[in-house]
Image (cartoon, rainbow, N blue to C red):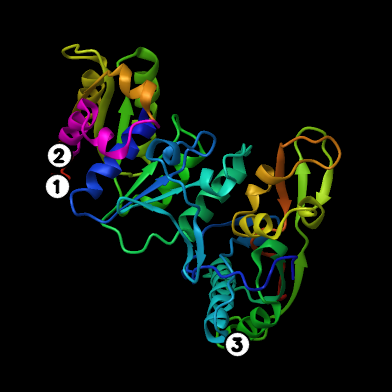
Amino acid sequence: MGKSLIAATAALILSTSSSKVGLLDLDLHGPSASIILGVGGAPVESEEGLTPPTVDCLEVMSLDLLAKGRPLPLRGESKEEVVKEVLALTAFGSLDYLVVDLPPGTGDELLTVSKYARQSGGAIVVTTPTKLSIAVAAKVVEILASMSMPILGLVENMAIGQADSLSETLARETGVKFLGRIPFDPAIFSDAGRLSRNELLNTRFAASLRSALMNAGFKVE
Amino acid sequence: MGPWPRRIRRRPPKPQIVGSSPTGPGLRVIGLWAGKAPVGLRLMHEYVIARGVIDSLLKAVSGSGRRIRDFRVVVGELSMLNMELLNEALTRLLEASELRGAGFRMEVEPASVGCGSCGFSMSFREAVSGLSEEEKEMIHFIPDLLASYTSCKRCGSLDLRIVSGRGVSVRDVSILEQ
């Protein structure tokens, strides 16, 4: 669904708008934030915990930086423990926004973050205009609502220009705000990780995401 | 306690019981992280854990008219808590609470690792033997990372999980006969 690319780019956009931003990659089995943003350093141990590396004023924490690119097989209960430990140990400092990238679906990572972040956070649900993706997104919305996790809106990624797409229908049916469409750009997905951060910010992808963030109420430049 | 370099520091813990649920005859309090902070702050951390234990027990007997006679506190090896300081904090807090007079004993639960592929079980120390200090340090922060750095000593699988040695639990709570 390109959700990690959306999370990383959203964090970059917010950080260039004079906000203090952190990006926390909690896609435990497929962490990619460090690849997308070209993060080279490792978290540094400090009195406050693990201080994440910074790229262009954006603090980035990913389990990949700790596992150094090695595989990380994790079973159920372990995932919840890892999420809690990373949330507690990462010393982001004072932030205006913390963007958390979660894996697809409705697993431990989503449940654990929602449990601890519902009083201060909000979710943006990412989907694509396919029946399969919409079906999963509907489940995510239902679970988030049941946990009283505020939902800032729904974003359709890889949009192919359909008016009144399945995503908009889902948004209407669930009462979630439709934040907009991000057009499918094959170059973005083939070049993700090769584009510089500046190049990424100047793509049509980023421009569409910027609009979606503004629709969600964020102040972006 | 544990094989870890004592110089490792972690962020000061937040006073929060992460979760509690009945576990057999006792209660489970998930402890938070230890650190090599100045003595006053370390006492504060063990104090926070002790506070969590007391609060869990008070909640369990609240409104029932029952009084606790004694209980057992099991401290996971991976929690890196100072047992002397925890003992001191529990003693002080018990004396100042409605549980005054209750006795307790503490023990350390060794950390162990299980292989999901072949079922082999090994101690945490055995699992991390042979790793560099830097690798051990990373695992010290997030123990589940061990599957990224080591494998089952019997079959070589990476499908490892922490089986025991986490957190703090309260067990075998006995009630005074009325």
> In the figure, B137 relative to A108: above or below?
below
| Circle 1 residue | A219
In reply to whether residue A210 is colored magenta, the answer given is: yes
Query: Could you tell me which chain the residue with mark 2 belongs to?
Result: A
Image quarter in which the C terminus of chain B is found: bottom right
Residue identifier under label 2: A214
Q: Is residue A204 above or below residue A131?
A: below
Q: Nearer the viewer, residue B76 or A72?
A: A72
Left or right: B104 in relation to A44: right
Magenta residue span: A193-213
User: Within 10 angstroms of label 3, few (less than 14), some, or many (20 or more) residues?
Assistant: some
Front residue (pair B7, A212): B7
What's the magenta bit mostly, secondary-structure-wise? helix
Q: Position of residue A117 (x, y in %)?
A: 37, 51
> Which residue is depicted at the point 77% across and 70% down?
B107
Residue B20 percent location from the top left of the image: 56, 58
